[in-house]
Amino acid sequence: MGKKRISDKMEKVLNTQMTREAYQAQVYLSYASWAEVNSFAGIANFLYGHMHEEREHMFKFLKYINDRGGVAKIEAIEAAPANPKDIGDCLRKTLQHEIDNSIEVDKIANLAHEEKDWPTFNFAQWFVKEQIEEETLINGIIDKYNLASTEVDGNNSLYEMDRDLTDASQESETPREEEF
Ligand code: FEO
């Protein structure tokens, strides 16, 4: 293990966020399974795909902590929340989970700035951008849902929206710089 280059406080905060990303994956997994059971195959597919993204986020935190001489601690993950009531509820709750997560990511950037820990500040920026992208992505799907569910042939439109999501990208349309 290399020399420790992050503060104890930062190590703790990064570990908490690592577990939070694992929780995000739990949320997507449970909502995906719920959508699948309720015959929304496209939304399920999209949510399963996003579950993998959240696991990658968790792993990025793990690697960063260890690479900076800290120790990643694998801890219990909170149980997934209750099933949503319907697709609208599912999407709105997903967005709220992402917003809550963005707030936590911003706190890491703030702490890194306070500590003048520029490597962690730089690391956190990737997540700041990722959160913008994720919120944009979910907001876009909510817009489509609102449109589909207010049209006269609402059920048919919802069916089409679900079908379109089968091949939907996990990325929003927001341009993003190359990953580091
Ligand atoms: Fe890793 Fe969707 O936040």
Image (cartoon, helix red, strand yellow):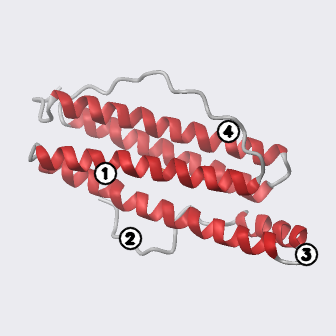
The N terminus appears in which quarter of the rendering?
Answer: top left
For mark 2, does the 10 Å Cα neighbourhood hold few (<14), some (14 to 19), or many (20 or more) residues?
A: few
Reading the image, the residue beneath label 3 is 153
| Residue at left offset 34%, top offset 67% | 178
Q: Position of residue 154 (x, y in %)?
A: 87, 71
Give the residue number, with chain letter if any, for mark 2: 176
Which of label 4 and label 3 is nearer to you? 3
Question: Distance from label 1 to label 3 (Cα)?
Answer: 42 Å
Q: Position of residue 56 (x, y in %)?
A: 45, 45
The residue mark sitting in front, 1 or 4, is 1
User: N-terminal of the two: label 2 or label 1?
Assistant: 1
Alpha carbon distance from label 2 to label 4: 28 Å
Pair 2/3: label in front: 3
Image point 77% across, 48% down: which residue? 35
- Tell me the residue that label 4 is attached to: 30
Which is more toward the observer, 116 or 123?
116
Task: Judge whether 21 appears above or below 178 on screen.
Answer: above
Q: Element at badge 4?
A: helix
User: Where, quadrant-wise, is the C terminus in this rendering?
Assistant: bottom left
- Earlier in the chain: of badge 2 and badge 3, it is 3
